[in-house]
Amino acid sequence: MYQDITLKCKDCGKEFVFSAGEQEFYAEKGFQNQPQRCKECRAAKKGVNPTTKPQRELFDAICAECGKPAKIPFQPTNDRPVYCSDCFAARKASK
């Protein structure tokens, strides 16, 4: 249904491919416009280096289930329990 399209970046002028898969994704999300920037210029505009994955800040916590130390991607608060990855997976599987 979709075919790869070659577009020209409005920032650097370099040609880039708007793949059939990307077009399908855009259609599923309801996006009306084609991308205007290549991947590198989009990343630069967002202030992200596209060749490196940004490091997530991890916080130390104690698992409410087993008491083991855990690293979590959000700042823990005292109003909600925090679980290590093993206990979290077990709780998720039991639901």
Image (cartoon, rainbow, N blue to C red):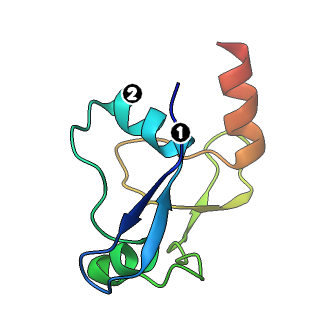
- What separation in Å lies between label 1 and label 2 (alpha carbons)? 16 Å
Q: Which residue is mark 2?
A: 28
**Is residue 16 toward the left or the right of residue 35 in the image?**
right
Q: Is residue 75 visible?
A: no
Neighbourhood count class around disc 2 (C-alpha, 10 Å): few under 14, some 14–19, many 20 upward: few
Q: Is residue 62 above or below residue 22?
A: below
Locate residue 34, reporting x and y percent. 29, 50
Q: Is residue 5 above or below residue 70?
A: above
Circles 1 and 2, Cβ within 8 Å, touching? The answer is: no
Q: Is residue 78 above or below residue 57?
A: above
Number of numbered discs present?
Answer: 2
Hey, what amino acid is under mark 1? Answer: Gln
Residue occupying image coordinates x 49% and y 45%: 22
**Is residue 11 toward the left or the right of residue 91 in the image?**
left
Residue occupying image coordinates x 40% and y 72%: 38
Q: Which image quadrant is residue 76 in?
A: bottom left
Locate residue 75, reporting x and y percent. 40, 63
Q: Which image quadrant is residue 41 in?
A: bottom left
